[in-house]
Image (cartoon, grey):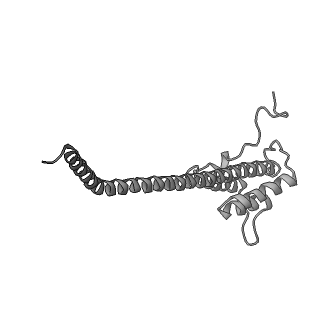
Amino acid sequence: MPTLETILLLFVLLGLAALAVLICRWLPAYVTEKGKNLATKEDVEDITRKIESVKADISRVSAVEEQKRKLKYEACLEALLVIDAHLSHSFTLPKPTPQAVSTVKAREAHSKLILSCDDIRIVEKFAEIYFGPSAGQSQRPPTDLLNEFRNLIRVELGFGQELSLDRERAWVGKSVGDPDAPL
C-alpha cells in the first residue's frame, strides 16, 4: 500500500501538472493580450501626439490668417479715408469741407492695398480715383468710382455682394458740425 508520502507526492505532481497545463494555455493568451494592450497604448500615445501637432499647426495657420485679415481690413479702411480726403479737394460745388491727407499716408494706403488685397481691381480703382483715368479711359463721375471702390472692398472683406448705391448720395461733402457751417 502506498504511503502517505507517496499519495501526497502524487497529489502535488497532479497539481503541478494541472498548473502547468493552465499556465501553458493561459499564459500565451495573457502575454498576447498584454502585448496588444501595450501596442494599443503606444498607438494611442502616437495618435495623440499627431493630433496635438495638427491642432498646433491649425492654430498657427489660423493666427496667421487672422492677422492677414486684420491687415487687409485696416488697409481697405485706410484707403477709403485717403480717397475721401482726396475727393474733399476735388469737388467745387457745393464746396466741401476739406480733409487733409499727406502724400506719405496716400503712399502707405496704396502700398497696403497692394500687399493685402487679392483683387487687383481694388488697387486699380484706387489709382483711377487718385490719379485720374488711364490713357484711353474716359473721365467718369468720382461718386461712381467711389461706389465701385466701396463695393470692391465690401466683396474683398467678405461683407457680401455689391450694393446698389446712389451716385448723388455717395459722398458727404458738408455736415452741420463743420466749423464753417451756418448756425
Q: Residue furthest bottom?
A: 136
In the rendered structure, the answer to whether residue 98 lies left or right of residue 21 reads: right
In the rendered structure, the answer to whether residue 37 lies left or right of residue 165 reads: left
Q: Nearer the viewer, residue 66 or 79?
A: 66
Viewer can see residue 42: yes
Q: Residue furthest top?
A: 183
Q: Quadrant of the C terminus?
A: top right
Q: Please name the residue shown 53% across and 56% down the image.
A: 50
Residue 107 point in image, percent of width and height: 83, 57
Residue 41 point in image, percent of width and height: 45, 52
Q: Please name the residue shown 83% across and 44% down the image.
A: 99
Viewer can see residue 154: no
In the rendered structure, the answer to whether residue 37 lies left or right of residue 10 reads: right
Residue 56 point in image, percent of width and height: 60, 52
The number of numbered badges drawn on the structure is 0
Picture quarter containing residue 140? bottom right
Q: Please name the residue shown 24% across and 48% down the image.
A: 9
Q: Nearer the viewer, residue 181 or 52?
A: 52
Q: Nearer the viewer, residue 49 or 160?
A: 49
